[in-house]
Amino acid sequence: MGNLKNLIRKIFMPSINSQYEFTLPIKSESDSDIENVENVGNIEKIFSNIASNLEYVKVQYKTLLNSDIVVREFLLNARNKKFKAFILFIDGMVNSALINDNILTPLMLRNRANTFEGTQNFIDYDQKTNNAIVRKIKKFDIKDYINTCLLPQNSVQIISDFSEVFDGVNSGNCVLFVDGLASAFDIEVKGFKQRGVESPNNEIVIRGAQQAFNESIRVNTSLVRRLVNNENLIIENIPVGNISKTKCAVCYINNIVNDNLVAEVKYRLNNINVDYVLSSGQLEQLIEDNGNYSVPELIATERPDRVAGYLLEGRVAIIVNGNPYVLIAPAIMLDFLSSPEDANLKYQYSNLLKFIRILALFLTLFLPALYIAITSFHQELIPTELLFAIVSSRESVPFPIIIELLIMEISFELIREGGLRIPSAIGPTIGIVGALILGQAAVEASIVSPILIIIVSITGLASFAIPDFSLSFHCRIVRFVYTFLGYLCGFLGIAMGFFIHLFILSSIESFGVAYLSPYIPFEEKYKKGLFVTPIWKREKRPDFLDAKKGKKQPNISMKWKYTK
């Protein structure tokens, strides 16, 4: 029996060593992956000795293996002395012209030796009398000299820890080390390629800005600042990820937002203990309150004007470097039924469109379930002629109605997913043609009935009318649950499922705000919220945000009507 087990193991589970005829070395826990790194260790402070700094950064960056790590050694002349120096940067992430013109050229070719001979004078101003005062400096400080005279770059920081060195280099900066200094110069010379500011791909509007975020965090923050021209707009950088150290910018307006909300957002970001976070979608799952539910709890948008509007309401935006979607917290369900177009249209148009979206939401959730419940349990609700037409159309269909519906629902989802994955030029065409051919062939083959094709088509179109794709995904998932409940128990099953669904939604919170606000829990002051009011009547910010400034405009905002 043992021989048989060994034979089966050799056939189906061959060992790597015997298959490829080489021996894997047995490695103990005490062995190091790279001996040099283990010998050097993790050092925090920068050495004053240039050789030690050079050796340490070469070991940490493994310059013998990394072909894009550049270490440039040279001599720096100052006060008739030569100082050993080197710069460290990553090729492809920096602007080489800036390094040559603003770093290497001043440090290597400009010799101002006589500048620091003897006593130096500079002009200062007395704060009380505002009179000019000539001060004298006798001591030569190479660090200040380099920083003030030899580095004509707009952003230079003096750092003293190797962790700051690695953060700067990994971000696309150039770090300068000089012999005798226990500090370094972090010089911003970013120059990596990035996508320009383009039109939105998903949140398209007819009347409105045609700008969208890209993958650069600085470009995205500048787009927000261009719209919110106020000194109270705060943008704090918080790195997330133990290895990736992805930059996240927390944006809020200091004199509007609730301080507790800002503190909660920063607390969650600072207490994420993962190796990497590469997108806003991953970050959303790490900071949302109820990750086990499929409903979206944070708004994801690619439009700067939408972010600016939410910031002015008193919310917090989170911009993730390398991702064009910005997260907004907190969020309620009504936010996902709003479109960026609503802010640019008159309130009558916006209310009509919102009513259509709410209708689309209910059709997406309940239409297939209602069809099954009525045809299986409540035939008395169907007009007689329509009932006879439905029965006659299903005479040749060999499957139960639930199987028939599942076939068409899954086929529709396959067409939708396939249309997204193939090239965009032919994606919509393939989707439309595939749906027509598949539906016609299914009816002719007596696999499904014609009325079911209509039901599935209306459901699919309704799901497209939901503005937020995350909420649309949630509705598509829950729709199958309602369908099975309608097949098993009819209207009773649908009603039970609806109350359970409503109970779950009412228990969800987004950063302390009830998900079904402003109606669950209901208060009289929350009576506005579902539909859009005229712009001159939007005096208050949402009450559930508890902003510092509750009013955003006076009761009379159009003063021109009353000043004549």
Image (cartoon, rainbow, N blue to C red):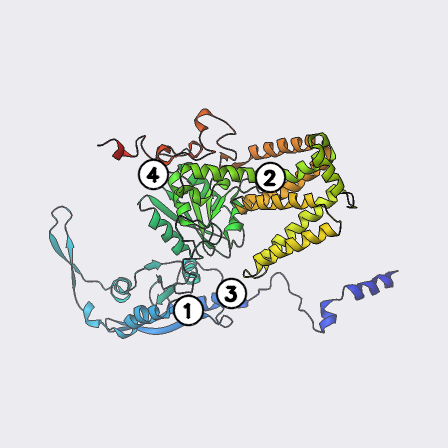
Instruction: Answer few, some or many: residues within 10 Å of disc 3's Cα (few below 14, many 20 plus, some between 14 and 19).
Output: some
Where disc 4 sits, the SS reads: loop
Instruction: Answer few, some or many: residues within 10 Å of disc 1's Cα (few below 14, many 20 plus, some between 14 and 19).
Output: some
Residue at mark 4 to residue at mark 3: CA–CA distance: 48 Å
Q: Amino acid at mark 3?
A: Val
Where disc 2 sits, the SS reads: helix
Q: Which residue bears the numbered disc 1?
A: 54
Q: Would you say the residues marked 4 and 1 are in contact, meaning their CB atoms lie under 8 Å apart?
A: no
Q: Which residue is nearer to you in this view: 79 or 235?
A: 235
First in sequence, mark 3 or 1: give its number.
Answer: 3
Residue at mark 2 to residue at mark 4: CA–CA distance: 42 Å
Q: Amino acid at mark 1?
A: Leu
Residue 263, percent across and down? 43, 40
The answer to whether residue 247 shows anywhere in this view is: yes
First in sequence, mark 2 or 4: give its number.
Answer: 4
Q: Of discs 4 and 3, which sits in the foreground?
A: 4
Q: Which residue bears the numbered disc 2?
A: 363
Residue at mark 2 to residue at mark 3: CA–CA distance: 61 Å
Residue at mark 4 to residue at mark 1: CA–CA distance: 47 Å
Left or right: residue 53 versus residue 280 is: left
Instruction: Answer few, some or many: residues within 10 Å of disc 4's Cα (few below 14, many 20 plus, some between 14 and 19).
Output: some
Look at 42% across and 55% down and name the residue there: 217
What mark, if any, has residue 37 been given in the picture?
A: 3
First in sequence, mark 4 or 3: give its number.
Answer: 3
Assign the N terminus to one quadrant of the image.
bottom right
Look at 45% across and 28% down and name the residue there: 527
Residue at mark 2 to residue at mark 1: CA–CA distance: 66 Å
Q: Amino acid at mark 2?
A: Leu
